[in-house]
Image (spheres, grey):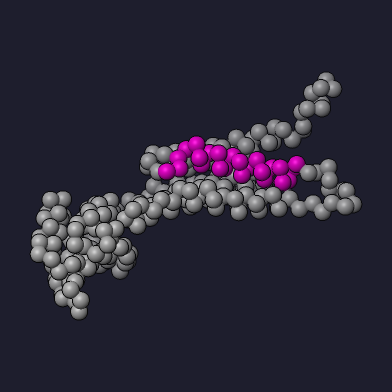
Amino acid sequence: MDFIDYYINPNDLLFVKRLGLSALLGCMIGWEREYSNKTAGLKTHLLVSLGSCLLMLLSIYGFLEWINHPNVRYDPSRLAAQVINGIGFLAAGSILVRPNLVVSGLTTSASLWVAMGIGLAVGSGNYFMAIATTTLVLLVLTIIPRIEERLIRRSRWDIDLLVEDKPGVLGKITSFLGGHNINILKINTSILKDSDYQVCIKIKVKTRKGLDDVLIGVQRIEGVIEVSNNMVAMGKRSHLKASNL
């Protein structure tokens, strides 16, 4: 009995409950990322949420014996604050910059950051806050992409190209687009002061991935210097430079 009293803390059941809930909520977000084949999936999100909850519990309950010590200033938020600083390194690791300068993994990085916050919320006893946040995150990750795809299907895109003044370059571009079943709506060309000229191609694609594949493929064509794209319906513009300068 003395052994049990020495090693079993009255708060242990509370700790297990909070750790279990944080693992479950992190697992739910991680499963969605795993299902979407992202860089950080189920295990990563589970461990981030679980570890954040553990450190929050340590912040609150791990140093109670020092509360009344005259030379110790007890602040339960300090250890938890370091979790927020540390998660940046892990989240940054999920962001990938491909050779064509296309950045991916930002959403997964954000979901890791939110999983950390959920773990801290559970560890501090804010169960409703953690569950509500998890629900909203799952809605964002599952519903928003569908809305984006619908907007893309209804939109037309302008691809602006800076091309070297060489014979056959424009033909290669149109052949590439035709080979990928891209609907070319309009082509405009204008000669610049240098030996290069600018080409504006209006196209229509069905998915965001289809657009990304087009941009990557066009960048690899010899003679293409620079590529940028513009969604006509929404006015979004992203700038990409070709990797074959």
Locate residue 187 relative to residue 54 in the image: left or right: left
Decide if residue 150 is in sight here. no
Percent x, y of residue 159: 22, 64
Percent x, y of residue 241: 30, 63
Residue name at image x 13 percent, y 66 percent: 166
The magenta segment is 39-62
Give the answer, above or below, for where 171 lies relative to 179. below
Percent x, y of residue 174: 12, 59
| The C terminus: image quadrant | bottom left
Locate residue 156 relative to residue 9 in the image: left or right: left
Residue name at image x 14 percent, y 72 percent: 189
Quarter occupied by residue 185: bottom left
Give the answer, above or below, for where 45 lies relative to 215. above
Percent x, y of residue 78: 71, 53
| Extreme-right residue of the structure | 70
- Towards the viewer: 32 or 82: 82
Locate residue 178 relative to residue 95 in the image: left or right: left
